[in-house]
Amino acid sequence: MAAAVASARRALARSTKPLVCYAVEQLPAKKGGDALYEQLRTAVASGDAELREALTIPACDARSWRVPAGWMWRIVCTEGPQVADMNAWSAADPRERFYTSKTRQMHATHLTVGDRLWSNMPFMRPLATIVEDTIAYGFDEDGAGVHDVIGSRCDPYTNHLLTGETKNDTCHSNLTRAALRDGLTEFDVHDVLNVFMCTGFTRDTQQYFTKPSPVAVGDYLEFLAETDLLVSASCCPQGDVSMACGAGGEPVTYPLGVEVYQPREGLLESCGWAPSEPSKYAGGHGL
Ligand SMILES: [Zn+2]
């Protein structure tokens, strides 16, 4: 009898069409409205936003920068195809940081225009919103997309497990050194947005795979800071990640550009935009 019940449950699962878990359209609307976010896509080109800071993330290293609420930043492909592993924290309290797994559940495995970067519990609010993605790759016939929130980051621990060797030129180590410069520690480094990285899961074994990044010089991914942020990114020592981890070979690596822009005074506020606020859940947890 028990076996029959179990068999029926297996059959039910196999025959049921997928149900999308989170109804994205039920999330609170973007403050300022979709028209504002559409305007921000071209704010720099139309003179509605001014460059306030520009920096270079050196090849095989990480840099951090601050973005006030309501300002924008870009990660720009300046010299050649290169992937970046990005972290973000609330500037006011670094315990609040980018939460890739919930972001993945809310939006998708790969992020693009309109998707938001959510923070961890108990804060759970948009840290940032993607306003422009010049690659707009979508998903190819292998199911690969760009800018994933699947992968964690390359790190010396996994490398040691796989090869027994000590390797410090990894995104995790790069981000750790940047975190220490910002008064944070290795424990503050978290799962990343893989900017420009082209990845997916194999159809047959559902294993994480990579392809050469489709990014070309001039491409950028642009964000609006929904609260005051500290952002950090590593130029992955795997370059465009066209080779599997531990496959040998010498990856070609490049630096990346970062540009921070301030929208024209009052542009966001006149549309009703305001910084995001932490979750209103009272935190009872049934205690
Ligand atoms: Zn990496």
Image (tube, grey):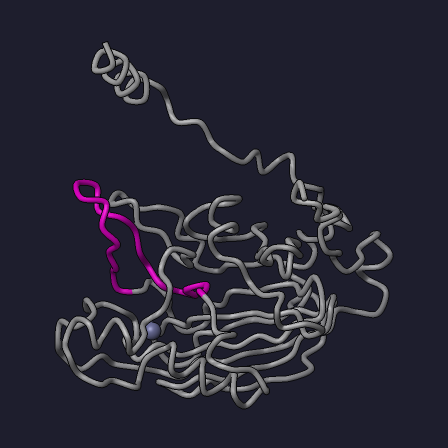
Does residue 147 appear left or right of residue 92 in this picture?
left
Q: Would you say residue 204 sits in the magenta stretch? A: yes
Q: Residue furthest bottom?
A: 181
Q: Quadrant of the N terminus?
A: top left
- The quarter of the rendering in which ligand 1 is drawn is bottom left
Identify which residue is drawn at 80% across, 57% down: 274
Q: Position of residue 198 (x, y in %)?
A: 32, 59
Does residue 15 appear left or right of residue 260 in this picture?
left
The quadrant in which residue 90 appears is bottom right
Does residue 237 appear left or right of residue 95 in this picture?
left
Q: Is residue 155 above or below residue 145?
A: below
Q: Would you say residue 226 sits in the magenta stretch? A: no
Q: Position of residue 58 (x, y in %)?
A: 42, 88
Identify which residue is drawn at 52% across, 51% down: 103
Q: Is residue 193 above or below residue 26?
A: below
Q: Is residue 146 visible?
A: yes
Q: Is residue 81 visible?
A: no
Viewer-proximal residue among 257 and 128: 128
Q: Residue furthest front?
A: 287
Residues shaded magenta: 191-212
The quadrant in which residue 54 appears is bottom right
Q: Position of residue 284 (x, y in %)?
A: 71, 45
Viewer-proximal residue among 274 and 76: 274
Identify which residue is drawn at 40% across, 57% down: 148
Q: Is residue 180 above or below residue 228?
A: below
Viewer-proximal residue among 109 and 223: 109
Q: For the image shown, how many numbered marks are present on the structure?
A: 0
The quadrant in which residue 78 appears is bottom left
Q: Quadrant of the C terminus?
A: top right
Q: Position of residue 134 (x, y in %)?
A: 48, 60
Identify which residue is drawn at 39% across, 52% down: 137
